[in-house]
């Protein structure tokens, strides 16, 4: 009543009633869209349970060193995972498997074991040659039957290498060379023929390898190496890691339920998935990801594995498109007991069983390399939906793009690959990550010199910006000096800052477009550099808070992408001697004192004209401090700027500077030499009397007048007026030069 009375009173006084408050109209925020291989389109990302995201990623098959193809997938997914977690705020449960039971592992483990046994028998050179010859016969037959041009080329290179290594040993035996020469040449042949001999030994003796530990040692070693490589690349470890060998009971139960649901059948101790029955059911369809690949027997056989493709195994299937859920183990293969007899898991079933056990009947994201779409992921989908009796086992399928090496297909089987360890010998983990960030995660990435040079230059561009900002922020001011008035230059930079942040957000919402993000960050840095240059020209101090805000934001975005490690707030970290040491904060006060002292000494040396002291100051700047990772930048009329930089970077800069100076000196010397030659040639020409100028050219002229001027050409034809006119100009010019020469001699010049 009181409120109503008050309103009536206002109305009585003639005041209009106030309209009810309403929230302001704003822009609709961007929604994250991800490219979903299931729909082959960018779809709005909607997790099944609020902000919680369940994610399964196909991990490595651990039988050899990890290569840049692995890096392509795992760095790409690491970036996506970090963006979802640290930028969009999702609670991500990331599960990854390690395949430690597989045809490739079994074959490689047997081959390594048999080859080591062979070496232990210390074959004599003659026996080695005989064995290599025997191993070459099946290899040559396989080579003749190989249609794939890339594989054929690789095999031809192997055959040539073996031939070239065998001939010197054969020659040494025939000519009775000393034992140490025979041993050296035998070792060269063993290295060249290792693959041939291993295949040959496995074909003959592989079935006799029965110790299961032989099949576990190899994957255990390479899994350890894989984790070391991922740590070196700053790839986050998974929240859950599953190994096939530890989930065999769950895999057996998974297969049994598929059989019970009517989508699997037993045949000669193996169990196969019935693709025809599954695809024919109303609720299911086979090969959702790549339906056009159904019937591709080459892809299907590669999915089954080298040890599982035979006429006998093919005859066990009801349809050529069916795939193994469980494989009856043959002699020379590891095995586990199950309702169908001793056997081992198929490749595809392991991911379904492990992911299903950890993440349940439906996950938000499933990730893997582009080449896994068919048959691996299509088979995973089919068997998982057959097990759970649903049609939505995976909501979003993300596939990382291929990696090529200098434009060529990368393949471990073709021996065309670069290991992660070798890549890290040439470039840092940050540089590799920046190279990946400069390309779309779902497109083909070419690992080449040009790609890496772009990443190196981008890193250098950002690092110089960070160093400049840090140097400005280190300038001491009192607390009130932190808050400077914003002029138009600050307003303009801030408008650019806001626009760039909005563009970055839009790019991340658009399928996590890191390439566009890096370009927006580049534009922001360029604008800030322009602002700093303008302030420097005006001899005005830049706004510290605004500058710090830009630097911290860029650092934060790089940290989101995993390109900045540790707790650094501004810029790339400078390594210390321990994990708890902030090197920059610790040493910079001392370096600043040293810089101030040097600046005072240089000022006195200039005033007192002591060049030796100035030279010592330059040596400190150019030679001593770079070895310690310190860069001093002298600016005329301004204080020296101190920057803490990676030592390797500074030494490389110093080497490049020396090379540039040497090149400049070489060009200067070359120019001086040319100038000297030109002056010598000019002097030689000046010495020639005009009446002798054309006499030496008897191949051009046959007759001359009394002054040595030509009148007829070499064929005796009288010169035309035009020809004579041109020659007269040359003659007159020579008269002038000769007079100058005579004057020079008269004045005591060169003779």
Image (cartoon, grey):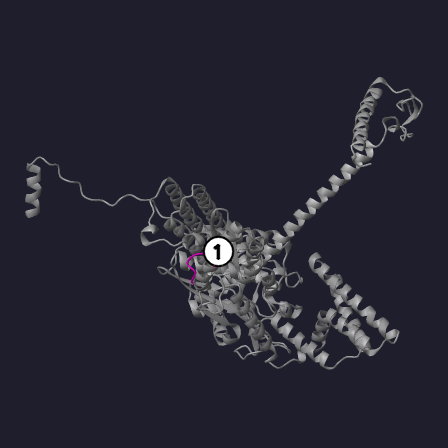
Q: Where is residue 496 in the image (x, y as percent from the top left)?
A: 41, 43
Find the residue positioned furthest to the top.
Answer: 721
Horizontal placement of 69 versus 8: left or right?
A: right
Q: Tell me if residue 262 can be seen.
A: no
Query: Looking at the image, which is closer to me, 309 or 693?
Result: 693
Position of 562 relative to 127 (above/below): above
Horizontal placement of 128 versus 326: left or right?
A: right
Residue displayed at 57% across by 64% down? 322
Q: Where is residue 50 in the image (x, y as percent from the top left)?
A: 35, 59
Position of 525 relative to 208 (above/below): above
Quadrant in the picture for residue 188: bottom right
* Magenta run includes residue 38: no
Residue pointed to by mark 1: 642
Query: Looking at the image, which is closer to me, 622 or 577?
Result: 622
Write the start and end of the magenta stretch as one range: 567-572
Q: Position of residue 26 (x, y in %)?
A: 31, 44
Residue displayed at 44% across by 55% down? 555
């Amino acid at each position: 009543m009181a409120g109503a009375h008050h309103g009536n009173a206002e109305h009585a006084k003639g005041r209009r009633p106030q309209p009810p408050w309403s929230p302001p109209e704003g822009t609709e925020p961007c929604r994250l869209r991800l490219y979903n291989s299931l729909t082959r389109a960018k779809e709005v990302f909607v997790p099944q349970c609020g902000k919680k995201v369940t994610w399964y990623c196909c991990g490595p098959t651990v039988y050899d060193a990890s290569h840049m193809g692995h890096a392509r997938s795992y760095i790409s997914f690491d970036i996506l995972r970090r963006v979802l977690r640290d930028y969009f705020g999702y609670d991500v449960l990331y599960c990854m498997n390690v395949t430690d039971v597989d045809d490739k592992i079994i074959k490689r483990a047997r081959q390594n074991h048999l080859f080591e046994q062979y070496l232990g028998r210390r074959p004599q050179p003659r026996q080695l040659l005989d064995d290599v010859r025997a191993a070459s016969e099946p290899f040559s037959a396989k080579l003749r039957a190989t249609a794939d041009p890339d594989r054929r080329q690789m095999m031809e290179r192997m055959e040539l290498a073996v031939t070239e290594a065998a001939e010197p040993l054969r020659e040494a035996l025939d000519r009775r060379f000393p034992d140490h020469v025979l041993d050296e040449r035998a070792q060269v042949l063993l290295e060249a023929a290792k693959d041939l001999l291993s295949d040959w030994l496995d074909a003959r003796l592989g079935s006799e390898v029965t110790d299961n530990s032989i099949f576990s040692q190899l994957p255990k070693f390479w899994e350890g190496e894989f984790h070391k490589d991922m740590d070196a690349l700053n790839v986050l470890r998974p929240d859950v890691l599953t190994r096939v060998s530890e989930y065999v009971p769950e895999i057996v139960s998974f297969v049994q339920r598929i059989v019970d649901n009517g989508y699997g059948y037993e045949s000669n101790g193996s169990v196969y998935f019935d693709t025809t029955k599954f695809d024919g059911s109303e609720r299911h369809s086979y090969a959702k990801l790549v339906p056009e690949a159904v019937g591709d027997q080459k892809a299907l056989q590669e999915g089954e594995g080298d040890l599982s493709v035979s006429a006998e195994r093919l005859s066990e299937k009801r349809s050529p498109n069916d795939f193994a859920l469980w494989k009856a183990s043959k002699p020379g293969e590891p095995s586990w007991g199950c309702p169908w007899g001793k056997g081992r898991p198929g490749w595809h079933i392991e991911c379904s069983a492990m992911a299903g056990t950890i993440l349940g009947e439906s996950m938000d994201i499933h990730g893997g390399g582009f080449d896994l779409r068919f048959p691996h992921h299509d088979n995973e989908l089919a068997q998982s939906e057959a097990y759970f009796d649903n049609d939505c086992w995976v909501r979003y399928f993300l596939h990382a793009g291929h990696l090529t090496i200098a434009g060529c297909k990368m393949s471990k089987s073709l021996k065309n690959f670069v290991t992660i360890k070798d890549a890290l010998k040439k470039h840092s983990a940050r540089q590799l990550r920046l190279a990946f960030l400069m390309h779309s995660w779902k497109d083909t990435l070419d690992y080449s010199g040009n790609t890496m040079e772009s990443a190196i230059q981008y890193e250098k561009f950002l690092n110089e910006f960070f160093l400049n900002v840090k140097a400005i922020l280190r300038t001491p001011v009192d607390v009130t000096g932190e808050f400077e008035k914003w002029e138009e230059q600050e307003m303009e930079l801030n408008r650019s800052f806001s626009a760039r942040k909005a563009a970055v957000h839009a790019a991340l919402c658009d399928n996590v477009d890191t390439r566009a993000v890096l370009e927006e960050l580049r534009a922001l840095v360029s604008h800030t550099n322009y602002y700093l240059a303008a302030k420097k020209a005006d001899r005005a101090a830049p706004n510290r808070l605004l500058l710090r805000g830009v630097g911290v934001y860029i650092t934060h975005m790089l940290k989101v992408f995993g390109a900045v490690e540790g707790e650094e707030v501004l810029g790339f970290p400078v390594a210390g001697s321990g994990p708890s040491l902030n090197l920059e904060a610790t040493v910079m006060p001392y370096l600043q004192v040293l810089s101030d002292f040097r600046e005072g000494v240089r000022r006195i040396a200039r005033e007192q004209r002591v060049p030796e002291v100035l030279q010592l100051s330059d040596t400190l700047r150019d030679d001593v401090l770079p070895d310690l990772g310190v860069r001093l930048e002298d600016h005329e009329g301004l204080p020296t700027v101190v920057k803490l930089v990676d030592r390797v970077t500074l030494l490389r800069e110093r080497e490049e500077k020396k090379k540039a100076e040497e090149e400049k000196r070489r060009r200067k010397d070359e120019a001086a030499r040319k100038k000297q030659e030109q002056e010598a040639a000019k002097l030689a020409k000046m010495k020639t009397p005009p009446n002798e100028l054309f006499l030496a050219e008897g191949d051009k002229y046959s007759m001359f007048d009394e002054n040595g001027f030509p009148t007829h050409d070499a064929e005796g034809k009288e010169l035309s007026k035009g020809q004579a006119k041109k020659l007269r100009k040359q003659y007159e010019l020579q008269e002038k030069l000769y007079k100058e020469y005579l004057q020079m001699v008269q004045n005591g010049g060169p003779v």
